[in-house]
Image (cartoon, rainbow, N blue to C red):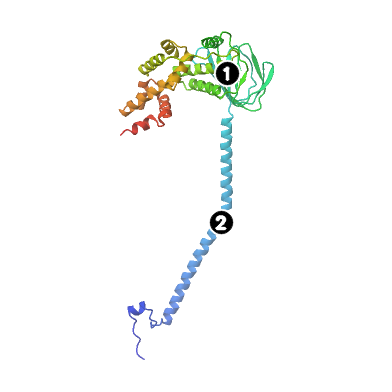
């Protein structure tokens, strides 16, 4: 028989079956080679499979450990938060620029207060639940209640079932009497009821306290006190006469004064003398004509001046000093509240 020819490349591609048969030696060699290869592959697979099974067995243990650690962390975090939330705080503030006024701030307080009062007081209760004996009757304080006190009276907490948070403004009798006379009262102010549910009163008291806590301008502290006294006088026995609105000329003089002295510490008494209006009447009339009380107007003027300074490359710290702010943090807080960005962010936006 003639020798078989080697298949061409075309025959390989076309699946030509006439391929030289493999010799027996090569068959044995290939069989041995593939056997060893498969054995090595199986060993590796079996090893990896055992490792996989081992790791699977470890997963529940690892999960249990992780869950235990997470639970412990959560408990510690919750305890820290609860401890922070339940931390009692009682603080007195004596404003240097509000003569005759003291402020008491209490947070998470469980004190069974029993006090005799020699001043007027407005106790704004953010959260409260105490049973109080006042004017020979039992009353229950609730969230949002404002408790009114006056000289010669006392009150006692009978039960305090949960922590309370409140802010109290104490006013000297002479100062409250003077405020009443300026509003047209002829008799010593006497509250009709010791408890009122008035969100405006609560807000006025909290804003006054915040202005003192944050060391805002003298004008703002005095203006907020005037608002607070005005609201309190609504609840005295003798109703307040309707106040006449302040004239445009008086308001224009005050605006011009604040524009000229935007970087200075201005008092409400200065503006009262300038406008020939009482401090209470001035704050009310100015807000009606301008849309904001005097202190807020002065802050707005400062912020407008700040924008010019920042656009011209003045550093925020220097701008705060030039504008009359107590420090840079005060400047940043007011700027961000009005402009919704910090002074530095505003300066970087200048193109």
Task: Give me the C-alpha separation between circle 1 and circle 2.
Answer: 67 Å
Report the residue at 47% width, 71% height from top: 36
Instruction: Name the residue rendered at 49%, 64% in the picture.
Output: 44
Q: Residue furthest bottom?
A: 1
| Front of the two marks 1 and 2 | 1
Where residue 69 sits in the image (x, y, percent)? 57, 43
Q: Residue 184 at what x, y percent from top left? A: 53, 10
* Residue 200 visible, this orientation: yes
- The number of numbered badges drawn on the structure is 2
Q: Nearer the viewer, residue 263 or 280?
A: 280
* Residue 23 found in image quarter: bottom left
Seen from the viewer's position, the closer of residues 231 and 7 is 231
Q: Position of residue 233 (x, y in %)?
A: 56, 15
Q: Which residue is mark 1?
A: 122
Q: Earlier in the sequence, mark 1 or mark 2?
A: 2
> Badge 2, how many Cα within 10 Å: few under 14, some, many 20+?
few
Q: Secondary structure at mark 1?
A: strand
Q: Of residues 103 and 207, which is closer to you in this image?
A: 207
Q: Is residue 5 left or right of residue 189?
A: left
Quarter of the N terminus within the rendering: bottom left
Residue at (51, 20) in percent of width and height: 208
**Are there few (<14), some (14-19), or many (20+) residues within 10 Å of tag 1?**
many
Q: Is residue 96 visible?
A: no
Spot occupied by residue 315 in the image (x, y as percentages of width and height): 34, 27
User: In the displayed structure, would residue 3 be above or below residue 98?
Assistant: below
Which mark is drawn over residue 56? 2
Q: Quadrant of the C terminus?
A: top left
Question: Element type at marker 2?
Answer: helix
Q: Are marks 1 and 2 in contact (CB under 8 Å)?
A: no
Residue pushed farthest top? 186
Q: Which mark is residue 340?
A: none
Q: Is residue 13 left or right of residue 155?
A: left
């Amino acid at each position: 028989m003639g020798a078989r020819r080697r298949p061409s490349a075309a025959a390989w591609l076309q699946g030509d079956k006439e391929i030289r048969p493999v010799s027996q030696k090569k068959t044995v060699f290939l069989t041995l080679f593939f056997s060893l290869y498969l054995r090595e592959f199986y060993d590796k697979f079996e090893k990896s499979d055992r490792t996989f099974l081992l790791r699977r067995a470890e997963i529940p243990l690892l999960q249990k450990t992780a869950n235990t650690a997470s639970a412990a962390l959560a408990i510690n975090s919750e305890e820290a938060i609860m401890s922070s939330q339940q931390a009692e705080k009682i603080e007195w503030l004596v404003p240097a620029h509000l003569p005759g006024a003291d402020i008491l701030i209490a947070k998470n307080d469980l004190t069974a207060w029993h006090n005799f009062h020699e001043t007027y007081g407005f106790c704004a209760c953010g959260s409260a639940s105490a049973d109080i004996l006042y004017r020979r009757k039992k009353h229950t304080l609730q969230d949002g209640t404002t408790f009114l006190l006056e000289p010669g009276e006392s009150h006692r907490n009978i039960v305090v079932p949960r922590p309370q948070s409140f802010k109290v403004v104490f006013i000297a009798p002479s100062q409250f009497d003077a405020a009443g006379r300026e509003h047209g009262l002829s008799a010593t102010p006497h509250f009709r009821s010791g408890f009122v549910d008035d969100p405006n009163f609560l807000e006025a008291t909290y804003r006054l306290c915040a202005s003192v806590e944050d060391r805002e301008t003298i004008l703002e502290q005095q203006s907020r006190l005037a608002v607070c006294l005005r609201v309190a006088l609504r609840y005295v026995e003798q109703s307040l006469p309707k106040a006449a609105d302040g004239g445009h000329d008086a308001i224009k003089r005050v605006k011009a004064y604040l524009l000229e002295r935007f970087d200075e510490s201005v008092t409400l008494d200065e503006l009262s003398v300038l406008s020939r209006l009482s401090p209470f009447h001035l704050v009310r009339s100015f807000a009606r004509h301008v849309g904001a009380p005097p202190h807020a107007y002065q802050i707005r003027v400062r912020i407008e001046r700040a924008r010019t300074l920042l656009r011209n490359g003045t550093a925020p710290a220097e701008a705060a000093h030039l504008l009359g702010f107590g420090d840079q943090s005060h400047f940043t807080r007011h700027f961000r509240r009005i402009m919704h960005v910090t002074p530095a962010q505003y300066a970087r936006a200048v193109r």
